[in-house]
Image (tube, rainbow, N blue to C red):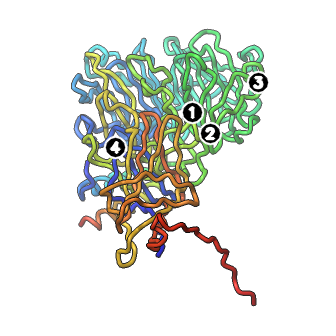
Amino acid sequence: MIKTVELARTNIQRIVGAVANDYEGQRAIVPQWKRGISNCIVSSGSGDYDGGDRVIGFMSYEVDGDLLITTGWGDGIAYRRLNNDGTLTKLWHDNYGLYRDTTSTYNHLHGVAIHKATSQAVFMSHNVNGYSLMDYSNLKAGGTTVVNERPPSQFVFSSGASVDRMGTYYTNGLVTAGDWLYVGDYDASHYKKYPRRNWRTGEEQLLDTSNNYPGSASVDRNGYRYTLYYDEVNDRVFYNSYYNGNFMVIVDASTDNPKLVWCDASDAGLGDDGYEDGLFVPDPVNNPNLLVMGCNSRNAYVDITPCFTGSTLTVLKQFYTESHPARFGNLHRAGTKYQSINNDEHIDKNPNFPDLCPCPADRGRQMLDGWLDWDNSKIVGVYRYNNTTEDTTSNGRGRSYRADYSSAPFRMRSANGTPYWIKLGYGFDGHGFRVWTDDIGNGLVGNWEVEYGTYTLDGNANIDFVNLGLVDHYTPSGCSLSIYVSNNNGSTWELYTASDDDHHMFNSTGYQLRVKYVASGQEDKAPYKLASAFDTATYGTLYESVKDVTIPYKVTRKKIRGRKK
Amino acid sequence: MDETLEYWQEKLAEFQEALESEQEMDIPNDSMLKLLKLEIDFCTKEIKILS
Protein backbone atom coordinates (compact mmCIF):
# COMPACT_ATOMS: atom_id res chain seq x y z
CA MET A 1 0.00 0.00 0.00
CA ILE A 2 1.51 3.32 -1.11
CA LYS A 3 0.19 6.83 -0.85
CA THR A 4 1.46 10.23 -2.01
CA VAL A 5 0.47 13.46 -0.27
CA GLU A 6 1.44 17.10 -0.47
CA LEU A 7 3.17 18.79 2.42
CA ALA A 8 0.66 21.58 2.14
CA ARG A 9 0.44 24.72 4.22
CA THR A 10 -2.81 23.46 5.70
CA ASN A 11 -0.96 20.40 7.02
CA ILE A 12 1.44 22.42 9.13
CA GLN A 13 1.29 21.21 12.72
CA ARG A 14 4.00 23.44 14.11
CA ILE A 15 6.00 26.36 12.76
CA VAL A 16 8.78 28.22 14.54
CA GLY A 17 10.70 31.18 13.15
CA ALA A 18 9.30 30.90 9.63
CA VAL A 19 6.50 31.95 7.30
CA ALA A 20 4.92 29.50 4.86
CA ASN A 21 2.53 30.52 2.11
CA ASP A 22 0.56 29.32 -0.87
CA TYR A 23 -0.61 32.27 -2.87
CA GLU A 24 -0.90 32.94 -6.59
CA GLY A 25 1.31 30.03 -7.50
CA GLN A 26 3.96 30.65 -4.87
CA ARG A 27 4.64 27.85 -2.38
CA ALA A 28 7.29 29.17 -0.06
CA ILE A 29 8.83 28.76 3.35
CA VAL A 30 11.03 31.66 4.38
CA PRO A 31 12.68 32.68 7.65
CA GLN A 32 10.92 35.37 9.64
CA TRP A 33 12.40 38.68 10.62
CA LYS A 34 13.13 39.08 14.30
CA ARG A 35 10.88 42.12 14.33
CA GLY A 36 7.17 41.51 14.58
CA ILE A 37 4.07 43.48 15.19
CA SER A 38 3.93 42.58 18.89
CA ASN A 39 7.55 42.85 20.03
CA CYS A 40 7.81 46.53 19.19
CA ILE A 41 7.59 49.29 21.74
CA VAL A 42 5.54 51.57 19.47
CA SER A 43 2.84 50.35 17.13
CA SER A 44 0.52 53.20 16.32
CA GLY A 45 -0.87 55.44 13.64
CA SER A 46 -2.92 57.72 15.82
CA GLY A 47 -2.27 60.67 18.11
CA ASP A 48 1.41 61.58 17.95
CA TYR A 49 1.79 58.99 15.22
CA ASP A 50 -0.90 60.35 12.91
CA GLY A 51 0.18 62.52 9.99
CA GLY A 52 3.01 62.04 7.56
CA ASP A 53 2.90 58.37 8.41
CA ARG A 54 1.73 57.00 5.06
CA VAL A 55 5.27 56.78 3.83
CA ILE A 56 4.89 55.29 0.39
CA GLY A 57 8.24 56.42 -0.93
CA PHE A 58 11.36 54.30 -1.03
CA MET A 59 13.64 55.96 1.55
CA SER A 60 11.41 59.02 1.66
CA TYR A 61 12.38 60.09 5.14
CA GLU A 62 15.28 61.91 6.76
CA VAL A 63 16.96 61.78 10.15
CA ASP A 64 18.71 64.70 11.81
CA GLY A 65 19.84 63.83 15.31
CA ASP A 66 16.74 62.81 17.20
CA LEU A 67 14.44 64.39 14.60
CA LEU A 68 12.60 62.18 12.13
CA ILE A 69 11.18 63.86 9.04
CA THR A 70 8.63 61.94 6.98
CA THR A 71 6.61 62.44 3.84
CA GLY A 72 3.18 60.87 3.46
CA TRP A 73 1.13 59.86 0.46
CA GLY A 74 -2.06 61.72 1.28
CA ASP A 75 -1.13 62.99 4.73
CA GLY A 76 1.64 65.50 4.14
CA ILE A 77 4.84 66.31 5.95
CA ALA A 78 5.69 65.70 9.58
CA TYR A 79 8.56 66.25 12.01
CA ARG A 80 8.85 64.12 15.11
CA ARG A 81 11.32 63.75 17.94
CA LEU A 82 12.47 60.31 19.06
CA ASN A 83 12.25 60.23 22.83
CA ASN A 84 14.61 58.38 25.13
CA ASP A 85 12.00 55.72 25.81
CA GLY A 86 11.51 55.00 22.09
CA THR A 87 8.24 56.86 21.71
CA LEU A 88 7.85 59.66 19.19
CA THR A 89 6.47 63.13 19.77
CA LYS A 90 4.90 64.90 16.82
CA LEU A 91 6.34 68.40 16.66
CA TRP A 92 4.94 69.73 13.42
CA HIS A 93 2.64 68.40 10.73
CA ASP A 94 0.97 69.89 7.70
CA ASN A 95 -1.28 67.72 5.58
CA TYR A 96 -0.89 70.17 2.74
CA GLY A 97 2.73 71.14 3.32
CA LEU A 98 3.75 70.91 -0.33
CA TYR A 99 3.46 74.09 -2.36
CA ARG A 100 2.08 73.07 -5.70
CA ASP A 101 2.64 75.38 -8.74
CA THR A 102 2.11 78.98 -7.68
CA THR A 103 -1.28 78.93 -6.04
CA SER A 104 -2.28 75.68 -4.37
CA THR A 105 -0.96 73.11 -1.92
CA TYR A 106 -0.78 69.34 -2.04
CA ASN A 107 -0.78 66.35 0.29
CA HIS A 108 0.62 63.40 -1.71
CA LEU A 109 4.39 63.41 -1.71
CA HIS A 110 7.39 61.15 -1.38
CA GLY A 111 10.48 63.23 -2.04
CA VAL A 112 12.60 64.70 0.74
CA ALA A 113 16.18 65.78 1.34
CA ILE A 114 17.71 67.80 4.13
CA HIS A 115 20.76 69.97 4.71
CA LYS A 116 21.74 69.45 8.31
CA ALA A 117 24.20 72.32 8.50
CA THR A 118 21.46 74.88 7.87
CA SER A 119 18.45 72.84 9.07
CA GLN A 120 16.69 73.08 5.72
CA ALA A 121 14.47 70.49 4.10
CA VAL A 122 13.04 70.25 0.61
CA PHE A 123 9.91 68.29 -0.31
CA MET A 124 8.49 67.26 -3.67
CA SER A 125 6.30 64.74 -5.44
CA HIS A 126 6.33 63.02 -8.82
CA ASN A 127 2.78 63.63 -9.87
CA VAL A 128 2.30 67.38 -9.38
CA ASN A 129 4.62 70.31 -9.87
CA GLY A 130 6.01 72.44 -7.09
CA TYR A 131 8.23 72.14 -4.05
CA SER A 132 8.53 73.30 -0.47
CA LEU A 133 11.71 74.53 1.15
CA MET A 134 11.52 74.59 4.93
CA ASP A 135 13.67 75.86 7.74
CA TYR A 136 13.39 73.58 10.76
CA SER A 137 16.11 75.16 12.88
CA ASN A 138 13.61 75.97 15.60
CA LEU A 139 12.97 72.24 16.05
CA LYS A 140 16.70 71.66 16.43
CA ALA A 141 16.70 74.26 19.16
CA GLY A 142 13.92 72.46 20.99
CA GLY A 143 10.98 74.42 19.61
CA THR A 144 7.93 73.33 17.69
CA THR A 145 7.77 75.65 14.69
CA VAL A 146 8.85 75.28 11.10
CA VAL A 147 9.16 78.02 8.51
CA ASN A 148 7.46 77.01 5.29
CA GLU A 149 7.07 79.88 2.85
CA ARG A 150 5.91 79.54 -0.72
CA PRO A 151 8.93 79.56 -3.06
CA PRO A 152 9.04 82.22 -5.79
CA SER A 153 8.45 79.62 -8.50
CA GLN A 154 7.35 76.03 -8.85
CA PHE A 155 10.79 74.99 -10.10
CA VAL A 156 13.30 73.66 -7.61
CA PHE A 157 15.85 73.97 -10.41
CA SER A 158 15.58 76.26 -13.43
CA SER A 159 19.01 76.95 -14.97
CA GLY A 160 19.03 75.16 -18.31
CA ALA A 161 16.41 72.68 -17.14
CA SER A 162 13.08 73.12 -15.40
CA VAL A 163 12.52 70.65 -12.61
CA ASP A 164 9.25 70.87 -10.74
CA ARG A 165 8.57 67.16 -10.22
CA MET A 166 11.03 64.51 -9.09
CA GLY A 167 11.56 60.77 -8.78
CA THR A 168 9.09 58.25 -10.01
CA TYR A 169 6.25 56.28 -8.51
CA TYR A 170 7.14 56.11 -5.62
CA THR A 171 10.79 56.83 -5.13
CA ASN A 172 12.93 59.68 -3.92
CA GLY A 173 14.59 61.88 -6.53
CA LEU A 174 16.29 64.17 -4.03
CA VAL A 175 19.59 63.68 -2.18
CA THR A 176 22.10 65.89 -0.45
CA ALA A 177 25.88 65.68 -0.87
CA GLY A 178 27.63 68.22 1.32
CA ASP A 179 26.14 71.61 0.52
CA TRP A 180 24.59 70.41 -2.73
CA LEU A 181 21.05 69.25 -3.37
CA TYR A 182 20.91 66.86 -6.32
CA VAL A 183 17.60 66.55 -8.14
CA GLY A 184 16.34 63.90 -10.56
CA ASP A 185 13.40 64.92 -12.71
CA TYR A 186 10.28 62.86 -13.26
CA ASP A 187 10.25 64.23 -16.79
CA ALA A 188 13.19 64.55 -19.18
CA SER A 189 13.95 68.23 -18.68
CA HIS A 190 17.63 67.83 -17.79
CA TYR A 191 18.41 65.92 -20.96
CA LYS A 192 21.69 64.04 -20.48
CA LYS A 193 22.61 66.47 -17.72
CA TYR A 194 22.51 66.35 -13.95
CA PRO A 195 21.22 69.28 -11.88
CA ARG A 196 22.41 70.33 -8.47
CA ARG A 197 21.56 73.35 -6.37
CA ASN A 198 23.57 74.79 -3.52
CA TRP A 199 21.71 74.74 -0.22
CA ARG A 200 23.53 77.82 1.08
CA THR A 201 23.71 80.09 -1.94
CA GLY A 202 20.99 78.84 -4.25
CA GLU A 203 23.54 78.52 -7.06
CA GLU A 204 22.45 76.06 -9.71
CA GLN A 205 24.77 73.87 -11.77
CA LEU A 206 23.88 71.53 -14.59
CA LEU A 207 26.60 68.91 -14.81
CA ASP A 208 27.32 67.64 -18.33
CA THR A 209 30.02 65.94 -20.37
CA SER A 210 32.45 68.72 -19.50
CA ASN A 211 32.34 67.27 -16.00
CA ASN A 212 33.19 63.73 -17.14
CA TYR A 213 35.59 61.71 -15.06
CA PRO A 214 38.81 61.50 -17.11
CA GLY A 215 38.46 58.35 -19.17
CA SER A 216 34.75 57.81 -18.60
CA ALA A 217 32.45 57.47 -21.59
CA SER A 218 29.84 60.16 -22.06
CA VAL A 219 26.17 59.58 -21.47
CA ASP A 220 24.79 58.22 -24.75
CA ARG A 221 21.12 57.94 -23.96
CA ASN A 222 18.89 60.16 -21.92
CA GLY A 223 17.04 58.68 -19.00
CA TYR A 224 14.12 60.05 -17.07
CA ARG A 225 12.04 59.38 -13.98
CA TYR A 226 15.14 59.34 -11.82
CA THR A 227 15.63 57.80 -8.43
CA LEU A 228 18.66 59.21 -6.63
CA TYR A 229 20.90 57.55 -4.08
CA TYR A 230 23.81 58.92 -2.10
CA ASP A 231 26.71 56.74 -1.00
CA GLU A 232 27.92 58.81 1.91
CA VAL A 233 31.01 56.65 2.46
CA ASN A 234 32.42 57.47 -0.97
CA ASP A 235 30.69 60.79 -1.62
CA ARG A 236 28.92 59.50 -4.73
CA VAL A 237 25.49 60.35 -6.08
CA PHE A 238 23.74 57.81 -8.28
CA TYR A 239 21.19 58.88 -10.89
CA ASN A 240 19.22 55.77 -11.84
CA SER A 241 16.47 56.19 -14.41
CA TYR A 242 13.27 54.20 -14.69
CA TYR A 243 13.31 54.64 -18.45
CA ASN A 244 16.52 53.89 -20.30
CA GLY A 245 18.44 51.46 -18.23
CA ASN A 246 21.66 53.14 -17.43
CA PHE A 247 22.92 55.05 -14.50
CA MET A 248 25.27 57.92 -13.86
CA VAL A 249 27.61 58.00 -10.90
CA ILE A 250 28.77 61.41 -9.74
CA VAL A 251 31.96 61.07 -7.74
CA ASP A 252 33.22 63.78 -5.40
CA ALA A 253 29.60 64.84 -5.36
CA SER A 254 29.92 67.23 -2.44
CA THR A 255 32.91 69.09 -3.84
CA ASP A 256 33.33 71.95 -6.30
CA ASN A 257 34.67 69.47 -8.81
CA PRO A 258 32.16 66.63 -9.23
CA LYS A 259 32.89 64.13 -11.98
CA LEU A 260 30.53 61.96 -14.01
CA VAL A 261 31.09 58.26 -14.55
CA TRP A 262 28.74 56.77 -17.13
CA CYS A 263 27.58 53.23 -16.33
CA ASP A 264 25.84 51.72 -19.31
CA ALA A 265 23.77 48.90 -17.90
CA SER A 266 22.01 48.08 -21.15
CA ASP A 267 25.31 47.61 -22.99
CA ALA A 268 26.21 45.14 -20.25
CA GLY A 269 23.10 43.10 -21.06
CA LEU A 270 21.04 44.26 -18.12
CA GLY A 271 18.10 45.44 -20.20
CA ASP A 272 17.01 48.69 -21.72
CA ASP A 273 15.30 50.20 -18.69
CA GLY A 274 15.91 50.57 -15.00
CA TYR A 275 12.57 49.46 -13.66
CA GLU A 276 13.84 48.10 -10.37
CA ASP A 277 14.94 50.26 -7.48
CA GLY A 278 17.71 50.46 -4.96
CA LEU A 279 21.41 50.81 -4.31
CA PHE A 280 23.37 48.50 -2.04
CA VAL A 281 27.14 48.57 -1.59
CA PRO A 282 28.08 45.57 0.56
CA ASP A 283 31.59 46.78 1.37
CA PRO A 284 31.80 50.50 0.59
CA VAL A 285 35.22 50.82 2.22
CA ASN A 286 37.21 48.04 0.57
CA ASN A 287 35.17 47.41 -2.58
CA PRO A 288 33.23 50.59 -3.30
CA ASN A 289 32.67 49.71 -6.97
CA LEU A 290 30.95 46.41 -6.28
CA LEU A 291 27.30 47.27 -5.83
CA VAL A 292 23.71 46.21 -6.39
CA MET A 293 21.69 48.50 -8.66
CA GLY A 294 18.10 48.32 -9.83
CA CYS A 295 18.07 47.36 -13.50
CA ASN A 296 15.57 45.92 -15.97
CA SER A 297 13.57 43.12 -14.30
CA ARG A 298 16.46 42.41 -12.01
CA ASN A 299 18.56 43.90 -9.25
CA ALA A 300 22.07 43.37 -10.52
CA TYR A 301 25.31 43.04 -8.58
CA VAL A 302 27.90 44.75 -10.74
CA ASP A 303 31.46 46.02 -10.75
CA ILE A 304 31.55 49.56 -12.09
CA THR A 305 35.37 49.81 -12.08
CA PRO A 306 35.60 49.45 -15.90
CA CYS A 307 33.28 52.44 -16.30
CA PHE A 308 35.99 54.73 -14.96
CA THR A 309 38.02 53.97 -18.09
CA GLY A 310 35.17 54.05 -20.58
CA SER A 311 34.28 50.36 -20.63
CA THR A 312 31.08 48.58 -19.76
CA LEU A 313 30.41 47.53 -16.21
CA THR A 314 30.96 43.90 -15.25
CA VAL A 315 27.92 41.87 -14.27
CA LEU A 316 28.61 39.67 -11.25
CA LYS A 317 25.17 38.42 -10.20
CA GLN A 318 21.61 38.97 -11.28
CA PHE A 319 18.63 38.77 -8.96
CA TYR A 320 15.66 38.41 -11.29
CA THR A 321 12.45 39.93 -10.04
CA GLU A 322 10.01 38.25 -12.38
CA SER A 323 11.31 34.70 -12.31
CA HIS A 324 8.54 32.50 -11.07
CA PRO A 325 7.69 32.20 -8.24
CA ALA A 326 9.34 35.44 -7.10
CA ARG A 327 7.14 37.78 -9.16
CA PHE A 328 8.24 40.96 -7.45
CA GLY A 329 9.00 43.14 -10.47
CA ASN A 330 8.93 45.76 -11.50
CA LEU A 331 9.84 48.61 -9.15
CA HIS A 332 11.24 45.98 -6.82
CA ARG A 333 13.07 47.63 -3.95
CA ALA A 334 16.44 46.26 -2.84
CA GLY A 335 18.90 48.31 -0.88
CA THR A 336 19.53 50.81 1.85
CA LYS A 337 19.44 54.57 2.12
CA TYR A 338 22.96 54.73 3.53
CA GLN A 339 25.90 52.43 2.99
CA SER A 340 27.87 52.87 6.20
CA ILE A 341 27.48 50.69 9.24
CA ASN A 342 29.47 53.08 11.39
CA ASN A 343 27.25 56.12 11.23
CA ASP A 344 26.29 56.55 14.84
CA GLU A 345 23.34 58.78 14.05
CA HIS A 346 21.55 56.74 11.43
CA ILE A 347 22.03 53.40 9.68
CA ASP A 348 19.75 51.08 7.77
CA LYS A 349 22.21 48.25 7.22
CA ASN A 350 22.52 45.46 9.75
CA PRO A 351 25.66 46.50 11.67
CA ASN A 352 26.64 42.89 12.42
CA PHE A 353 25.78 41.48 9.00
CA PRO A 354 26.50 44.27 6.50
CA ASP A 355 25.89 41.95 3.52
CA LEU A 356 22.22 41.71 4.38
CA CYS A 357 20.44 43.53 1.56
CA PRO A 358 16.84 44.26 2.57
CA CYS A 359 14.03 44.15 -0.02
CA PRO A 360 11.04 46.09 1.28
CA ALA A 361 7.52 46.04 -0.16
CA ASP A 362 6.27 47.74 -3.28
CA ARG A 363 2.79 47.65 -4.91
CA GLY A 364 1.51 45.06 -2.48
CA ARG A 365 4.30 42.61 -3.26
CA GLN A 366 7.11 41.45 -1.00
CA MET A 367 4.73 42.61 1.72
CA LEU A 368 6.58 41.02 4.64
CA ASP A 369 10.00 42.25 3.40
CA GLY A 370 12.57 40.09 1.71
CA TRP A 371 16.33 39.84 1.28
CA LEU A 372 18.93 38.89 -1.30
CA ASP A 373 20.50 35.44 -1.17
CA TRP A 374 24.00 36.05 -2.48
CA ASP A 375 24.80 32.36 -2.89
CA ASN A 376 21.84 31.37 -5.01
CA SER A 377 21.10 34.77 -6.61
CA LYS A 378 17.54 34.73 -5.36
CA ILE A 379 15.21 37.36 -3.98
CA VAL A 380 13.77 35.69 -0.91
CA GLY A 381 10.33 36.59 0.37
CA VAL A 382 6.66 35.76 0.18
CA TYR A 383 4.54 37.49 -2.41
CA ARG A 384 1.87 38.87 -0.07
CA TYR A 385 0.55 38.41 3.46
CA ASN A 386 -2.37 36.38 2.10
CA ASN A 387 -2.54 32.63 2.70
CA THR A 388 0.38 32.58 5.08
CA THR A 389 1.00 30.51 8.18
CA GLU A 390 3.65 31.80 10.52
CA ASP A 391 5.02 31.67 14.01
CA THR A 392 3.30 34.36 16.05
CA THR A 393 4.32 33.31 19.52
CA SER A 394 8.12 32.97 19.77
CA ASN A 395 9.84 35.86 21.52
CA GLY A 396 6.56 37.72 21.80
CA ARG A 397 6.89 38.53 18.14
CA GLY A 398 3.33 38.37 16.91
CA ARG A 399 2.66 38.33 13.21
CA SER A 400 4.98 39.86 10.63
CA TYR A 401 4.88 43.54 9.77
CA ARG A 402 3.04 43.98 6.48
CA ALA A 403 2.73 46.88 4.09
CA ASP A 404 2.01 47.59 0.46
CA TYR A 405 5.03 49.89 0.24
CA SER A 406 7.89 50.33 2.68
CA SER A 407 11.55 51.04 3.23
CA ALA A 408 14.07 49.02 5.16
CA PRO A 409 13.89 49.65 8.90
CA PHE A 410 16.47 52.14 10.06
CA ARG A 411 18.21 52.88 13.34
CA MET A 412 18.32 56.33 14.85
CA ARG A 413 19.12 57.55 18.33
CA SER A 414 17.25 59.56 20.91
CA ALA A 415 18.81 62.56 22.65
CA ASN A 416 20.63 60.39 25.20
CA GLY A 417 21.99 58.12 22.50
CA THR A 418 19.63 55.18 22.88
CA PRO A 419 19.27 53.40 19.53
CA TYR A 420 15.90 52.33 18.15
CA TRP A 421 14.86 50.72 14.89
CA ILE A 422 11.93 52.31 13.07
CA LYS A 423 9.88 51.08 10.14
CA LEU A 424 7.73 53.19 7.85
CA GLY A 425 5.40 52.25 5.04
CA TYR A 426 2.10 52.63 3.27
CA GLY A 427 -0.95 50.40 3.62
CA PHE A 428 -1.78 48.01 6.46
CA ASP A 429 0.90 48.45 9.15
CA GLY A 430 2.46 51.16 7.02
CA HIS A 431 -0.06 53.73 8.13
CA GLY A 432 1.77 54.32 11.35
CA PHE A 433 5.09 53.92 13.11
CA ARG A 434 6.68 50.78 14.45
CA VAL A 435 9.66 51.10 16.81
CA TRP A 436 11.85 48.24 18.05
CA THR A 437 14.73 48.09 20.48
CA ASP A 438 18.27 47.61 19.20
CA ASP A 439 18.46 43.95 20.23
CA ILE A 440 15.66 43.11 17.80
CA GLY A 441 17.03 45.25 15.01
CA ASN A 442 16.68 44.34 11.36
CA GLY A 443 17.90 40.76 11.13
CA LEU A 444 16.31 37.40 10.37
CA VAL A 445 15.39 34.90 13.07
CA GLY A 446 17.80 32.50 11.37
CA ASN A 447 16.87 29.10 12.81
CA TRP A 448 13.44 27.80 11.92
CA GLU A 449 11.36 24.63 11.99
CA VAL A 450 8.22 23.47 10.23
CA GLU A 451 6.39 20.24 10.97
CA TYR A 452 3.81 18.63 8.68
CA GLY A 453 1.31 15.89 9.38
CA THR A 454 -0.35 13.75 10.33
CA TYR A 455 -0.59 11.43 7.34
CA THR A 456 -1.94 7.90 7.51
CA LEU A 457 -2.75 4.97 5.27
CA ASP A 458 -6.14 3.36 4.80
CA GLY A 459 -7.07 1.34 7.84
CA ASN A 460 -4.16 2.88 9.70
CA ALA A 461 -1.77 0.43 8.10
CA ASN A 462 1.83 0.59 9.25
CA ILE A 463 4.10 3.08 7.53
CA ASP A 464 7.43 1.41 6.86
CA PHE A 465 9.08 3.74 4.38
CA VAL A 466 8.83 7.26 3.05
CA ASN A 467 10.23 9.14 0.10
CA LEU A 468 10.14 12.93 0.00
CA GLY A 469 9.84 14.96 -3.16
CA LEU A 470 11.56 18.23 -2.32
CA VAL A 471 10.93 21.13 -4.66
CA ASP A 472 13.17 24.17 -4.90
CA HIS A 473 14.76 24.33 -1.49
CA TYR A 474 17.81 26.58 -1.21
CA THR A 475 20.49 26.55 1.45
CA PRO A 476 22.87 29.51 1.50
CA SER A 477 26.47 28.96 2.51
CA GLY A 478 27.03 28.50 6.21
CA CYS A 479 23.45 27.35 6.70
CA SER A 480 21.93 23.89 6.85
CA LEU A 481 18.61 22.18 6.40
CA SER A 482 17.95 18.87 8.13
CA ILE A 483 14.84 16.82 7.50
CA TYR A 484 13.35 14.42 9.99
CA VAL A 485 10.55 11.91 9.58
CA SER A 486 8.43 10.09 12.10
CA ASN A 487 5.95 7.24 11.69
CA ASN A 488 4.60 7.50 15.23
CA ASN A 489 3.18 11.02 15.15
CA GLY A 490 6.36 12.65 16.35
CA SER A 491 7.14 10.43 19.35
CA THR A 492 10.48 9.58 17.78
CA TRP A 493 12.22 11.18 14.83
CA GLU A 494 14.63 9.75 12.28
CA LEU A 495 16.96 11.80 10.11
CA TYR A 496 15.95 11.66 6.47
CA THR A 497 18.98 11.25 4.25
CA ALA A 498 17.57 9.38 1.26
CA SER A 499 18.51 10.68 -2.14
CA ASP A 500 15.94 11.76 -4.71
CA ASP A 501 14.68 8.37 -5.91
CA ASP A 502 15.48 6.44 -2.80
CA HIS A 503 13.40 6.02 0.32
CA HIS A 504 13.89 6.10 4.06
CA MET A 505 13.10 2.89 5.97
CA PHE A 506 11.76 3.48 9.45
CA ASN A 507 13.40 1.78 12.40
CA SER A 508 10.29 2.35 14.49
CA THR A 509 6.83 0.95 14.09
CA GLY A 510 3.92 3.27 13.54
CA TYR A 511 1.12 4.40 11.28
CA GLN A 512 1.15 8.22 11.66
CA LEU A 513 3.59 10.04 9.41
CA ARG A 514 5.06 13.41 10.22
CA VAL A 515 7.78 15.35 8.40
CA LYS A 516 9.88 18.05 10.00
CA TYR A 517 12.26 20.60 8.48
CA VAL A 518 14.92 21.98 10.81
CA ALA A 519 16.83 24.93 9.37
CA SER A 520 19.95 26.52 10.77
CA GLY A 521 20.73 30.07 9.71
CA GLN A 522 21.69 33.46 10.99
CA GLU A 523 20.56 37.08 10.83
CA ASP A 524 21.46 37.64 7.19
CA LYS A 525 20.57 34.31 5.60
CA ALA A 526 18.87 31.03 6.26
CA PRO A 527 17.52 28.10 4.24
CA TYR A 528 14.27 28.65 2.39
CA LYS A 529 11.90 27.15 -0.13
CA LEU A 530 10.79 29.24 -3.09
CA ALA A 531 8.72 27.06 -5.34
CA SER A 532 5.56 26.79 -7.35
CA ALA A 533 4.69 23.40 -5.89
CA PHE A 534 4.43 21.88 -2.45
CA ASP A 535 6.85 19.16 -1.45
CA THR A 536 5.42 15.65 -1.46
CA ALA A 537 5.70 12.56 0.71
CA THR A 538 5.25 9.07 -0.72
CA TYR A 539 4.92 6.46 1.99
CA GLY A 540 3.66 2.95 2.45
CA THR A 541 3.76 -0.50 3.93
CA LEU A 542 6.13 -3.31 3.07
CA TYR A 543 5.37 -7.01 3.27
CA GLU A 544 6.58 -8.63 6.50
CA SER A 545 8.98 -10.80 4.55
CA VAL A 546 10.67 -7.73 3.11
CA LYS A 547 11.07 -6.18 6.54
CA ASP A 548 12.67 -9.32 7.99
CA VAL A 549 16.37 -8.62 7.71
CA THR A 550 17.23 -12.31 8.06
CA ILE A 551 15.58 -13.03 4.75
CA PRO A 552 17.64 -11.91 1.78
CA TYR A 553 15.55 -10.13 -0.77
CA LYS A 554 15.90 -8.11 -3.87
CA VAL A 555 13.41 -5.65 -5.22
CA THR A 556 12.78 -6.56 -8.82
CA ARG A 557 12.42 -3.48 -10.91
CA LYS A 558 10.13 -4.40 -13.73
CA LYS A 559 9.11 -2.09 -16.47
CA ILE A 560 5.39 -2.22 -17.06
CA ARG A 561 4.64 -2.13 -20.69
CA GLY A 562 1.42 -1.19 -22.31
CA ARG A 563 -0.40 -3.77 -24.36
CA LYS A 564 0.10 -3.43 -28.05
CA LYS A 565 -3.06 -2.83 -30.00
CA MET B 1 -2.46 44.89 15.99
CA ASP B 2 -4.29 41.57 15.86
CA GLU B 3 -6.48 40.77 12.88
CA THR B 4 -9.75 41.60 14.58
CA LEU B 5 -12.92 42.89 12.97
CA GLU B 6 -11.89 46.36 14.11
CA TYR B 7 -8.52 45.98 12.40
CA TRP B 8 -10.04 45.06 9.05
CA GLN B 9 -12.65 47.80 9.30
CA GLU B 10 -9.92 50.33 9.97
CA LYS B 11 -7.88 49.09 7.02
CA LEU B 12 -10.93 49.10 4.77
CA ALA B 13 -11.61 52.73 5.64
CA GLU B 14 -7.98 53.64 4.92
CA PHE B 15 -7.97 51.94 1.54
CA GLN B 16 -11.32 53.43 0.58
CA GLU B 17 -10.09 56.90 1.47
CA ALA B 18 -6.90 56.29 -0.51
CA LEU B 19 -8.86 55.08 -3.53
CA GLU B 20 -11.00 58.17 -3.45
CA SER B 21 -7.90 60.36 -3.36
CA GLU B 22 -6.24 58.51 -6.22
CA GLN B 23 -9.32 58.75 -8.39
CA GLU B 24 -9.37 62.50 -7.91
CA MET B 25 -5.80 62.95 -9.11
CA ASP B 26 -5.01 64.70 -12.37
CA ILE B 27 -3.27 61.60 -13.66
CA PRO B 28 -4.44 58.55 -11.70
CA ASN B 29 -1.92 55.74 -11.34
CA ASP B 30 -3.55 52.60 -12.77
CA SER B 31 -1.26 50.31 -10.85
CA MET B 32 -2.18 52.02 -7.58
CA LEU B 33 -5.90 51.96 -8.35
CA LYS B 34 -5.72 48.25 -9.05
CA LEU B 35 -3.83 47.60 -5.83
CA LEU B 36 -6.24 49.62 -3.69
CA LYS B 37 -9.26 47.84 -5.17
CA LEU B 38 -7.59 44.51 -4.46
CA GLU B 39 -6.93 45.47 -0.85
CA ILE B 40 -10.50 46.67 -0.44
CA ASP B 41 -11.73 43.31 -1.69
CA PHE B 42 -9.54 41.47 0.78
CA CYS B 43 -10.65 43.66 3.67
CA THR B 44 -14.29 43.19 2.73
CA LYS B 45 -13.88 39.42 2.66
CA GLU B 46 -12.22 39.40 6.07
CA ILE B 47 -14.96 41.57 7.53
CA LYS B 48 -17.61 39.21 6.18
CA ILE B 49 -15.86 36.25 7.77
CA LEU B 50 -15.56 37.97 11.14
CA SER B 51 -19.03 39.57 11.17
- Residue A424 at x, y percent in the picture: 37, 37
Q: Are marks 1 and 3 on the same chain?
A: yes
From the top left corner, tell me how far across and down residue A475 is, in percent.
Answer: 52, 43
Subunit under mark 4 = A
Q: Are marks 1 and 3 in contact (CB under 8 Å)?
A: no
Q: Confirm or deny contact between disc 1 and disc 2 (CB under 8 A).
A: yes
Residue ID for mark 3: A218
Label 1 to label 3: alpha-carbon separation: 20 Å
User: Circle 1 sits on which residue?
Assistant: A227
Amino acid identity at mark 1: Thr
Q: Which residue is drawn at 46% across and 74% down?
A: A543
Q: What subunit carries mark 2?
A: A
Residue type at mark 2? Tyr
Q: Which tag, 3 or 2, sits closer to the chain's start?
A: 3
Compare marks 1 and 3 and give the one earlier in the sequence: 3
Q: Name the residue under label 4.
A: A431
Residue B3 locus on image (x, y percent): 27, 54
Q: Name the residue under label 2.
A: A242
N-terminal of the pair, mark 4 or mark 2, is 2
Work out whether mark 1 precedes mark 2 in sequence or the reverse, and give the earlier one.
1
